Structure formats: C-alpha cells, structure tokens
Amino acid sequence: MHRVTLIPGDGIGPEVTSAARAVVEASGADVAFEPVLAGQEAEKASGTPLPPAVFESIARTKVALKGPTYTPFGGNYRVRVERPNAQGNLEQRSYPSLAITLRKELGLFVNLRPIKNYPNVPSRYDKVDLVIFRENSEDLYIGNERMVDENTAEGIKRITRVASERVARFAFDYMRKVGRKKITVGHKANVMKMTDGLWLKSAQDVAQAYPDIALDQRVVDALCMELVMKPETFDGLLLTNLYGDIISDLAAGLVGGLGVAPGANIGPDCAMFEAVHGTAPDIAGKDIANPTAMILSAVLMLRHLEESQAADRIEAALTAVLAEKRVITRDLGGNAGTRAFTQAIVEKLKSN
Ligand code: ATP
C-alpha cells in the first residue's frame, strides 16, 4: 500500500485534486491518500500557509499530489518556515511562493514535464511527444540579486557540476527506463562560456555512460525556433532552470496549453506531483475546471510508484473520453462540468 500526501490547495485546486483522487481510487492502484491543508485555508486555520503537518506527512509518505496554491503578486510576500539546517539546528528560511518552498525544502532537483498531444485537445501540431527535464535548484533562480546603484541591478547565475550531472543522470536514467532514445541539451555556451559551458560539458560527460541514448545539443534560441517548426523531431529536452521554465510553457502551448500540462518535481528522498496551471480564481468553485492536467500528474505519480498498470489504465480511459467527444469540459469546447468529466473517466475505468 502506497500512502500519498494530498494537498488540495487553493482556487480550483480542491476540485481538480478530488477529480484526480477519484480516478486513482477507481483505477485499482494500491494507494491511500492522506489529505493535509496548505495555502489559504491553512493560513486561515493556523496562521501559516505551510504548517509543519505538511512536512511531517511528506516525510512519512515520500510522495505528494499537490493542487495549485495561491501566490499574491508583488509586495513582500514570503512563505516562512522553521526547519532544521544541514547541522540539524532549527533555522528560519523564507521563499517567494509556497510551491518554491516545497521544492527547495524537499530537495526536489528536477522538474519533469511530459508534453504530448491528446485527442480533441485543440493544437497546431499532432505528433508531439517529448519530455522536458528542467534543473530545479540553481541557475539565475538562486535569488542572489542586488542593486549596484539606483539604476543598475545584477544577479548571479550559479551552475555547479554536482547539480548539472545530477539532473543529467536523472534524465538519461528516465529515458532508458521508458525506452526513449535522444536527449537534446539546451544551452548558450557560445556566450556564457563558463556557466553554460560547464552545464553542457557536464551533460556530455554523463552521456558517456549511456551509449544507448543519443545526446544532441542546441543553442537555446535555435532550439526555440526548431521547437515551433518541427516539434515532432524532439524526444527529451535537458534544460537549466531558466531556459527550462520558459521552454516548458512554450512546449505546453504546442499541445493545447494549461488544461493538459502535468508536472512532477523529484528529489532523492521524495517527489511531488502537480499540474502546471495555477489556481484560476476566475473559475474556482463553479465545477467548470478541466481536471486533465491534475489527472495526468497523478498518472506520473503512479508511474513513479511503479503502479504502471493503473497509470496505463487511467491514461487509456482519459484518452477514450476525450476521443469520444461526448463529455468534454468547456475549455476544450464542450459543456461538461469537472465532476461529469471525472465521472465519465471513472465509468470507463470500471467498464474496462
Ligand atoms: P495563479 O495566480 O494561481 O497562477 P491564474 O489564474 O493567474 O492563477 P492560471 O491558474 O495558470 O493563472 O490560469 C490562467 C487562466 O487559464 C485561468 O484564468 C483559467 O481561465 C484558465 N485555466 C487554468 N487552468 C485551467 C483548468 N484546469 N481548466 C480550465 N481553465 C483553466
């Protein structure tokens, strides 16, 4: 039996996570969910958006399925946590959002995003099937910025061999496991000779141990152009934190956007699965959100738990419901609600 921490989150989070939960429970997977509050509800109840119960639960289960959580724009909003440091002493730390807090505090070093066409999801392309591996811990996102003077700002781009090789090894192992054949590493080593040079060299060094998987490389601007001209030629993309952030949204746009883009954050001890979309407050509580991205995130979670039969069954049921086009959510041109769409998938699972 796998125990899984379930974080319903804010906005449409409770609706789409309860859809994902219902589908997982109908799939026959050996999973028990442990719901914990994080986000606005938690803040109302306990004064903090990220109570210690969240970390306690994930420390036990090692796996979380997370709905989107609200982050206010601008201001000095920080999520504060008090947790042990490397020496075991309690330390206060703060981050710009709840999702970033969880990623950093749990050491989730890779952000994995599969990008694939599904039937009847409107898109300009029809043969896209690729996986993005985004380094999740360093690069320009370490937040080391400063004002030199009133009119000059600068920020540090940090690239280490340890983090670069770690994510490259993860990518090669993953590709081998799922039978994919080619990784394209994105970089700008022609200009950033040291930082992106080290990133590229690290990927090339790791590739030596994987002769069965080809390593290709592209300067990141050329990569963007090729992605929109012939996305079907890409298989795996290995990207630094900033390029990965930008290109994964671009790639989600190749297959129909936010409603169908799932994601995983994985580290050595635990993993967290979440849709790419946010809390969508404009449609929250109205039973109109599309739960597909959250359900596909749960499919990634089941594959991580080696419940591959249940994962295959859910993906097949979801694909069948989309292909039939009878029960489709509004964002995809139908008029079914979140619950009706979920129920159609659950019925497919029961009848197959
Ligand atoms: P946040 O501030 O949490 O990022 P947001 O509304 O600014 O929220 P998203 O939640 O990513 O950003 O969504 C942008 C728009 O896309 C929403 O207004 C919503 O209409 C639409 N959207 C996002 N997710 C879904 C979904 N699962 N189903 C249907 N529409 C969605």
Image (tube, rainbow, N blue to C red):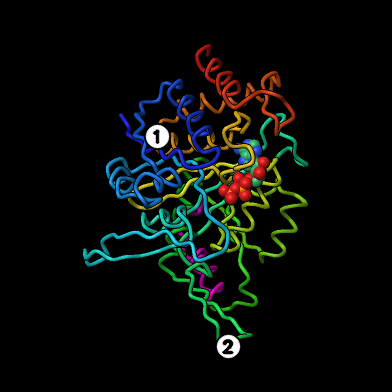
Task: Mark yes or no: residue 137 visible.
Answer: yes
Q: Is residue 196 above or below residue 43?
A: below
Q: Is mark 2 within 8 Å of ligand 1?
A: no
Callout 1 environment at 10 Å: few (<14), some (14 to 19), or many (20+)? few
| Nearer to us in this view, 233 or 269 | 269
Q: Which residue is mark 2?
A: 149
* Residue shown at the point (61%, 73%) measured from the top left: 189
Magenta run includes residue 211:
yes
Quarter in which the N terminus is drawn = top left
Residue 246 % position (x, y): 63, 58
Q: Nearer the viewer, mark 1 or mark 2?
A: 2
Q: Which residue is mark 1?
A: 306
* Residue shown at the point (59%, 81%) measured from the top left: 153
Q: Secondary structure at mark 2?
A: strand
Q: Main secondary structure of the magenta part?
A: helix
Q: Amino acid at mark 1?
A: Glu
Q: Earlier in the sequence, mark 1 or mark 2?
A: 2
Classify residue 201 as left or right of residue 127: left
Classify residue 145 as left or right of residue 186: left
Pointer 1 and pointer 2: residues touching (CB < 8 Å)? no
Q: Is residue 140 above or below residue 134?
A: below
Q: Quadrant of ligand 1?
A: top right
Which label number is shown at residue 174?
Answer: none
Answer with the quarter of the image where residue 180 lies.
Answer: top right
Residue 298 % position (x, y): 48, 35
What segment is highlighted magenta in the picture? 195-212
